């Protein structure tokens, strides 16, 4: 039996393609320079008149304020929320920034509402950015992972509106990194992700297909424990309010389209954007769900390398949910990170870097199109993953022993 090939040393690792490095460096500089400039120029958080800018984070702070005032169930009431938000910002605005997260996420909102709005906004973005950067560094397996993470185009969008995309990406990526060697910790990450229930479809399917029972049951226990603790902290009324207002939320965003269809990045939204009916949109969405679920079962039961399985699950998570805004596309950075890991080990195929460049273009210039370009970006990454799964090798890579689900190989 031939002796196993040892892993390459750092000095023997293939160089990062200059086009990839340079593109990421430019995007990193743009992201890093934009927000100090925007804040002091009053383009971000406050406007030139010193009033708060209406944006997504206001619903987090206002929900937390209601918790601190002893009325957690009121966080789900759109009218009460808006009155607090208008008072906070000092100006009114069209529409609503509604709170629709399950009660466990009220713990985060209540913590942030203890601070002044600007401090809470910047603190939330900064603190949630850290685990995302660490996760991407671990996925890529090189210091370049820091730059790739900071350069991802949706970093700007997520930071601009103060959303939770960094946290979501950290939990998805953390679960996928930890699964081969730390299944209990992976299950904890997945259980914490239950604050985004629309992401809950594919993970159980993949875990069952791979017989990862410890991760599966740990995630279930954590999710149930979170629900129980939030019930004790915020009362039955908060859970009743969550379920009472959920149909109204669904009606507003998935039937009436109160948020323009171009803002959502799913195939359902794409159909509605081009004038398709709601039943037609659901037909396309359910077809997508079925196809992605079947593909995930095949991939996770196959012997393709683990990085491809992880990338496929991250990308598939975005394809199967109809409710998906651009800030949630931070999860696409996780799938991209696994692809870059493979490319840096095996070499990139001639079409991969141009395709990733097109993906970044679709995410960066979404405002110019006003269409679900994020869905196209996800399809590009999914196609690259599928191509790697179907024709996995361009040349021999170090340590190319058969993939086992308990081994995180490139």
Image (tube, grey):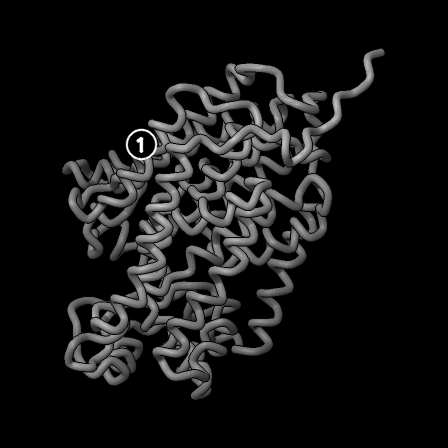
Query: Of all residues shown, which one is farthest toward the right?
Result: 1
Above/below status of 115 relative to 16? below
Residue 108: image x %, image y %? 49, 71
Residue 245: image x %, image y %? 35, 65
Query: In which quadrant will I find the N terminus?
Result: top right
Residue 161 placement, left or right of 73: left
Residue 407 placement, left or right of 347: right
Determine whether the residue tagged by mark 1 lies in a helix, strand or loop. helix
Residue 219: image x %, image y %? 64, 52
Above/below status of 230 relative to 330? below
**Quadrant of the rendered image containing residue 51:** bottom left
Q: Residue at x 36, y 65 (%)?
A: 162
Above/below status of 22 relative to 6? below
Query: Of all residues shown, which one is farthest toward the top?
Result: 1
Please indicate, yes or no, whether residue 296 appears anywhere in the rendered image. Answer: no
Please indicate, yes or no, whether residue 238 appears anywhere in the rendered image. Answer: yes
Q: Which residue is mark 1?
A: 284
Q: Residue at x 60, y 47 (%)?
A: 175
Number of marks = 1
**Quadrant of the rendered image containing residue 17:** top left
Callout 1: 10 Å neighbours few (<14), some, many (20+)?
some
Q: Residue at x 68, y 53 (%)?
A: 185
Residue 100 placement, left or right of 145: left
Q: Nearer the viewer, residue 116 or 152?
A: 152
Residue 132: image x %, image y %? 51, 54
């Amino acid at each position: 039996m031939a002796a196993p090939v040892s892993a390459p040393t750092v000095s023997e690792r293939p160089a990062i393609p200059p086009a990839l490095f340079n593109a990421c460096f430019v995007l990193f500089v743009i992201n890093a320079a934009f927000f100090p400039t925007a804040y002091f120029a009053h383009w971000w958080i406050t406007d030139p008149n010193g009033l708060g800018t209406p944006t997504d984070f206001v619903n987090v702070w206002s929900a937390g304020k209601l918790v601190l005032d002893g009325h957690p169930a009121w966080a789900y009431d759109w009218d009460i929320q808006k009155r607090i938000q208008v008072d906070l910002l000092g100006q009114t605005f069209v529409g609503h920034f509604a709170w629709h997260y399950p009660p466990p996420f009220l713990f985060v909102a209540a913590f942030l509402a203890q601070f002044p709005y600007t401090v809470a906004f910047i603190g939330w973005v900064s603190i949630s950015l850290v685990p995302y950067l660490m996760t991407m560094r671990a996925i890529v397996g090189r210091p370049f992972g820091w730059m790739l993470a900071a350069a991802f185009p949706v970093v700007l969008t997520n930071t601009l509106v103060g959303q939770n995309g960094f946290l979501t990406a950290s939990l998805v990526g953390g679960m996928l990194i930890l699964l081969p060697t730390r299944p209990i910790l992976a299950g904890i990450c997945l259980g914490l992700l239950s604050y985004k229930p629309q992401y809950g479809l594919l993970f159980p399917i993949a875990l069952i297909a791979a017989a990862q029972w410890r991760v599966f049951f740990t995630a279930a226990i954590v999710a149930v424990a979170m629900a129980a603790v939030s019930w004790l902290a915020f009362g039955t009324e908060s859970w009743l309010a969550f379920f009472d207002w959920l149909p109204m939320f669904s009606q507003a965003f998935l039937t009436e389209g109160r948020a323009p269809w171009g803002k959502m990045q799913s195939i359902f939204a794409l159909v509605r954007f081009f004038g398709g009916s709601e039943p037609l949109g659901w037909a396309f969405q359910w077809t997508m769900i079925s196809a992605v679920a079947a593909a995930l079962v095949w991939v996770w039961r196959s012997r393709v390398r683990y990085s491809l399985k992880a990338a496929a699950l991250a990308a598939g998570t975005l394809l199967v949910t109809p409710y998906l805004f651009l800030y949630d596309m931070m999860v696409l950075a996780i799938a991209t990170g696994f692809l870059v890991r493979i490319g840096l080990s095996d070499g990139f195929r001639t079409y991969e870097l141009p395709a990733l460049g097109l993906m970044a273009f679709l995410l960066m210039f979404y405002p110019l199109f006003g269409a679900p370009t994020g869905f196209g970006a996800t399809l590009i990454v999914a196609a690259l993953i599928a191509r790697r799964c179907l024709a996995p090798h361009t040349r021999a890579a170090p340590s190319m022993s058969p993939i086992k689900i308990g081994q995180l190989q490139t």
